[in-house]
Structure formats: structure tokens, C-alpha cells
Amino acid sequence: MQRQTTIANNKTVERKWYVIDATDLPLGRLASEVARYLTGKNKVIYTPNVDCGDYIIIVNAEKVSLSGDAEHKKTYYNASGWARGIRARSSGTMIREYPEEMVRRAVHGMLPKGRLGRKIESKLFVYVGSEHKHEAQKPEPLTLKF
């Protein structure tokens, strides 16, 4: 008797909604765990070429912690495409003015690149403050252990 390998497809994947409170969580560790849940690597049925991950809601993005001297030394760059159109911001500026973008960029760096990565990234929702607009989906609280 041979055992059959189960390969996931879009019809067989069950997706859950999770909400994560980012208060005092290290940014890099939060991003790596969120990327693991978004891609579905925490599931037994994980298949690399199928989006089998869950939906993640991150609240209190402004309260995420940075380790060491990262608030002053780490720099985020944006390029407009024009000559001398590069803009640099420190992590301190990003966490004060654009905390959602900072968390989103950290998670984006840990997801696969390409068409599937963009589809996976669309299941991430980041909010400043403790309120979000996804109560109808009944998200389960997810506590990360690290």
C-alpha cells in the first residue's frame, strides 16, 4: 500500500484570521513570524507554489521595539526615479511618522518575490492603534513566543 502525498491547492486550503498586538515586540522577530504565517509554513499542508497562508492583522504598529541603536543607525530609502530623487529616513522618523509602512516593509523583505509573494502580501493588514476594521472575520488573537 502506497501513501499519497497531499498537495495543497486553492480549493483545499483553509485560511484563518489572526490578530497580533505588536506592543514591545522586536520588529525583526515579529516580521519573520508574520511571514511564516502568511506563507503557510506553519501548516502541515505547506506547498511552496500555492498560497496556503493565513490572514494577519497587526495592531499597535507604532509600539514595536527596535533593538540596539537601530533607531538612529538604520535608514530607509525611497527613490522617485528622477535625478537626485532619493529620500532617506531614519528608523526613528519612520516609527514616529510611518509605523505601518515600517512594519509592512519588514514583512515584505521576508516574503518570496514575484507574483505569489505579492498575493501573499495582500493578506497582511497593519494598523496604528488597537482598532481595526476586520471584526466581521472574527480574528483569533495570536501570541508569538520568542
Image: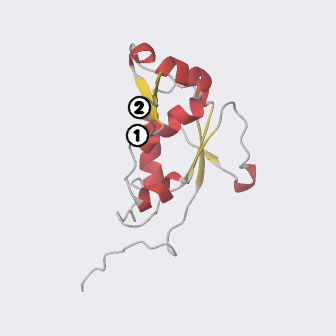
Q: Quadrant of residue 48?
A: bottom left
Tell me if residue 56 comes above or below residue 44 in the rendering.
above
The amino acid type, in three-letter code, at marker 1 is Ser
Left or right? Give the position of 43 relative to 99. Answer: left
| Circle 1 crowding by C-alpha within 10 Å: few under 14, some 14–19, many from 20 | some
Identity of the residue drawn at 53% across and 55% down: 54
The C terminus sits in image quarter: top left
Q: Is residue 47 above or below residue 23?
A: below
Crowding around mark 2 (Cα neighbors within 10 Å: few <14, some 14 to 19, many 20+) is some
Indicate left or right for 70 with 14 as reference.
left
> Which of the pair 96/23 is nearer the observer?
96
Q: Which residue is mark 2?
A: 28
Farthest bottom residue in view: 1
Name the spot of residue 96 as percent of width and height, x first: 59, 20
Q: Secondary structure at mark 2?
A: helix
**Distance from the alpha carbon under mark 2 to that under mark 1:** 6 Å
Kindly identify the residue that appears in the image at 46 percent across and 31 percent down.
85
For the point 73% across and 36% down, which residue is it?
131
Residue 83 vertical placement versus 55 (above, below) = above
Q: Please, what secondary structure does the residue beneath circle 1 have?
A: helix
For residue 13, the mark is none
Q: Which mark is residue 32?
A: 1
The answer, for residue 61, to whether it is visible in the render is yes
The amino acid type found where label 2 is placed reads Gly
Are the residues at dot 2 and dot 1 in contact (C-beta closer than 8 Å)?
yes
Q: Position of residue 112 (x, y in %)?
A: 37, 53
| Residue 146 in view, yes or no | no
Q: Quadrant of the N terminus?
A: bottom left
- How far from the left and from the top, in percent, is residue 137? 70, 55
